[in-house]
Image: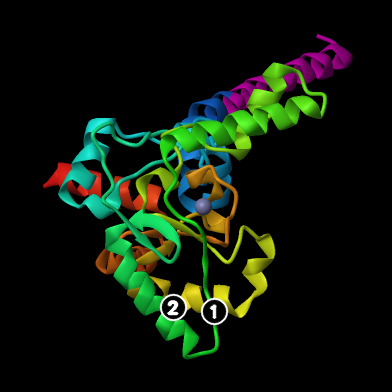
Amino acid sequence: MSRHKKIKSTAKLLLLCLLILVSSILFLFIAQNEPMIHWVKTFMPSVSSANSQVSQPESLPESATESSLSIEKISKVWEKDSNLVLVNWEYALPEHYEPKLQKAFDMEMDERLVEPYRQMIEAASKEGITFWISSAYRAPELQKELLEREIKENEKKGMSSEEAREKASAAVAKPGHSEHNTGLAIDLNGVRADFEHEKGYAWLQQHAAEYGFILRYPKEEESKTRIMFEPWHYRYVGKENALKMKELGMCLEEYVKYLALKEENN
Ligand SMILES: [Zn+2]
């Protein structure tokens, strides 16, 4: 064998060895891949969370996280404590629900809130704050009228009847779905968004719960109540519930569900 040929075959052998080495490394890397992911997950949590987000998103769409409770479960809560009747976009006023109405402050309202309201406005007046009720109980029939009126107004603006109804439903609750139908809700000092900036509003934020009232549609709970922030609308739930809700930071939807689930687990 010539010297030249010898060098050539040695080079071939070396190349073959190199190929085997590279393949082995590749094989080992692939085989190690699983444990490697495990290692990444253990020691690099930021990488692992980015990885797991693909199969397990941290923030589910609202519709998926919001589990509605059956009307039976919701009913159990207010049958136990009638201050907690829940009326909203989802739950209508229960059929056999009859508010015990009383005339007071030039309005009609559930008798339960008359005395607490009187005490509340007396306490506020000592600090120079005046409250007046601009709306209290509304019969479901009146709600129907309000809705029809709103639809007509929208149609006058040139909307199609379908569009007019859709827009009106977003602004005015359907009959039986307004909290004013319960007799337990009051609108204070007119229906004004700027009430939020008045000292009366600040006073209510601090003291309303002591008299059993809650701000029913808070700004930060719009996704749960499905009603835009209403600084003027207060709901009577009783002192104990109001204080508990304040402590837990829950709106009525959350609180009723919380109680229903608590009852279920007992
Ligand atoms: Zn209202």
Visible in this render: residue 188? yes
- Where's residue 4, x and y in %? 88, 15
The image shows residue 247, relative to residue 64, as above or below, that is below
Q: Is residue 189 left or right of residue 101?
A: right
| Magenta span of residues | 1-26
Q: Nearer the viewer, residue 164 or 10?
A: 164
- Where's residue 20, x and y in %? 63, 20
| Amino acid type for the residue under numbered disc 2 | Ile
Mark 1 element type: loop
Q: Quadrant of residue 242?
A: bottom left
Residue at the (36%, 46%) spot, across then down: 182
The image shows residue 50, relative to residue 33, as above or below, that is below
- State yes or no: discs 2 and 1 in contact (Cβ < 8 Å): yes
Residue at the (63%, 68%) spot, across then down: 196
Residue at the (19%, 41%) spot, across then down: 76
Which label sits on residue 121? Answer: 2
| Amino acid type for the residue under numbered disc 1 | Thr
Visible in this render: residue 16? no
- Where's residue 258, x and y in %? 29, 50
